[in-house]
Image (cartoon, rainbow, N blue to C red):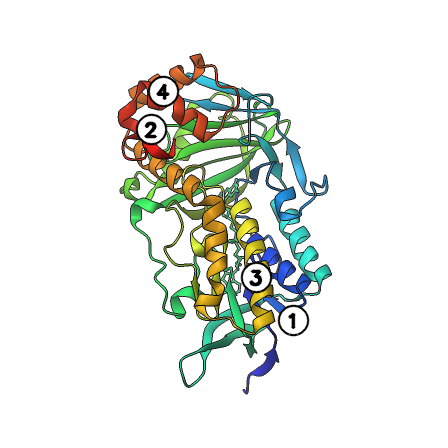
């Protein structure tokens, strides 16, 4: 069957936060934009713990809306394996405390913003390959839309296809990661549990080797309870399910609970790809591996990079130049805004993964006793640097 043909300025592959924000800002810039999403519903299936900080939302033009905010947190608790804890309340929480979202509604809200700006959205449309002209120039993508083959010709492709991104790979870019930079996650939506509904909880150390356990409340007796384990530490019989079931069984607040939903997924924990643009191609969000290496939080990074991509593409369209050189301001924009922090948190993640439980206990106690005015990773590392200089060796200059 001959493939139906579509023509546009920008085709965005993937309808997650990165894709929707890129589509919104491209459409606002007057570009004919098509966003394609392989699944039947934006924001589903869920692959997220749904926690975000609050500060960045307005930066990317999103007004907080109760329609997609499930719970507003008062604080966060960081626990060591033996139960020492450090509690951050709103006054000290800095950017680390925030909302627990209804992620499927949040993602739909962003897609609706893109549509309102004029972008076309094609659901159940999975990209199956890229199209190059006879000179090897990227000129569009192939897809299957509701089972029918289609071709979408565009001046530039935005790869917003998440962790499993294929588009960049098809275009010849190196998006591979080391196993130590991949965290495998498993989460249960649990009910009938006895948690503090106003605090997000994080447990570091051996309960989740190379990652952490999270308990993100979604109401009085309901929460996302999950963990991530570093790829290199997922040995036979010691996978995320083993660790999560063990953690729940040993916690009296959780072990009488019931599971309503199971979520699995991977996050990258490297500090972003070395190259995020190529001729006629831009990578955003998880596809560009731009995600906080220590928290695995990537919603805000996807939104920011999507917005930057849309803005730069609008400028490129004015000169009708979508070459790698012309797209470089996108690369510079996200690096200027985030790269130092991503690298610092990457190094902190590397060190944290090597610490034994005893040292983690000492670190948490140290932080407990410190008088940090605003708690964020930077300030925490400053305290750690004084007492445990070895932990921050090699990236002291970023602290
Ligand atoms: C278990 C887990 C928990 C997490 N918890 C949090 C958290 O609490 N807070 C946080 O900030 N971040 C969290 N993250 C990370 C966060 O979910 C991602 O960083 C974020 O979703 C990245 O957005 P994105 O738009 O780049 O990619 P995605 O949200 O993954 O969107 C990519 C989209 O592309 C679509 N797609 C893929 N391939 C194709 C194709 N070939 N054709 C068409 N469409 C395609 C997918 O269906 C998907 O809709 C978590 C991740 C996991 C796995």
Q: Are marks 4 and 1 in contact (CB under 8 Å)?
A: no
| Among numbered discs 2 and 3, the one appearing first in the sequence | 3
Q: Which mark is residue 32?
A: 1
Marks 1 and 2, how far apart in space?
A: 50 Å
Q: Which mark is residue 39?
A: 3
Task: Report how far apart the C-alphas of labels 4 and 2 lie in the structure.
Answer: 14 Å
Task: Tell me the quarter of the picture where residue 10 sits.
Answer: bottom right
Give the residue drawn at x 53%, y 23%: 374
Give the distance between the C-alpha atoms of the residues marked 4 and 1, in whole angstroms: 52 Å
The residue singled out by tag 2 in the image is 206
Label 3 near ligand 1 (CB < 8 Å): yes
Q: Is residue 327 above or below residue 394?
A: below
Image quarter hosting the N terminus: bottom right
Residue labelled 2 has its Cβ within 8 Å of some atom of ligand 1? no
- The number of numbered badges drawn on the structure is 4
**Foreground pick, 151 / 38:** 151
């Amino acid at each position: 069957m001959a493939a139906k043909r579509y023509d546009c300025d920008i085709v965005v592959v993937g309808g997650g936060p990165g894709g929707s924000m890129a589509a919104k800002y491209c459409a606002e810039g007057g570009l004919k934009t098509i966003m394609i999403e392989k699944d039947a519903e934006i924001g589903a299936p869920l692959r997220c713990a749904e926690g975000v900080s609050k500060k960045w939302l307005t930066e990317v033009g999103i007004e907080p809306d109760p329609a997609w905010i499930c719970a507003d947190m008062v604080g966060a608790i960081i626990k060591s394996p033996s139960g020492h804890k450090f509690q951050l309340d709103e006054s000290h929480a800095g950017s680390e405390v925030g909302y627990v979202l209804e992620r499927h509604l949040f993602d739909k809200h962003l897609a609706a913003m893109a549509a309102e700006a004029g972008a076309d959205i094609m659901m159940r449309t999975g990209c199956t390959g890229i199209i190059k002209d006879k000179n090897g120039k990227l000129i569009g993508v192939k897809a299957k839309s509701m089972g029918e083959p289609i071709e979408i010709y565009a001046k530039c492709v935005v790869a917003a296809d998440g962790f499993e991104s294929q588009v960049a790979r098809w275009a010849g870019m190196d998006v591979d990661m080391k196993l130590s930079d991949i965290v495998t996650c498993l989460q249960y939506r649990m009910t009938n549990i006895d948690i503090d509904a106003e605090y997000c909880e994080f447990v570091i150390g051996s309960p989740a080797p190379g990652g952490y356990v999270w308990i993100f409340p979604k109401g009085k007796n309901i929460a996302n309870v999950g963990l991530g384990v570093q790829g290199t530490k997922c040995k036979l019989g010691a996978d995320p399910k083993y660790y999560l079931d063990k953690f729940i069984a040993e916690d009296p607040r959780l072990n009488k609970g019931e599971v309503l939903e199971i979520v699995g997924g991977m996050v990258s924990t490297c500090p972003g790809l070395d190259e995020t643009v190529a001729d006629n191609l831009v990578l955003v969000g998880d596809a560009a591996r731009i995600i906080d290496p220590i928290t695995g939080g990537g919603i805000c990074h996807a939104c920011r990079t999507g917005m930057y991509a849309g803005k730069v593409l609008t400028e490129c369209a004015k000169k009708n130049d979508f070459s790698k050189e012309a797209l470089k301001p996108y690369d510079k924009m996200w690096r200027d805004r985030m790269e130092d922090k991503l690298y610092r948190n990457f190094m902190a993640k590397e060190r944290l993964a090597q610490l034994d439980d005893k040292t983690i206990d000492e670190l948490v106690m140290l932080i407990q006793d410190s008088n940090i005015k605003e708690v964020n990773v930077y300030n925490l590392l400053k305290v750690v640097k004084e007492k445990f200089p070895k932990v921050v060796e090699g990236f002291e200059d970023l602290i």
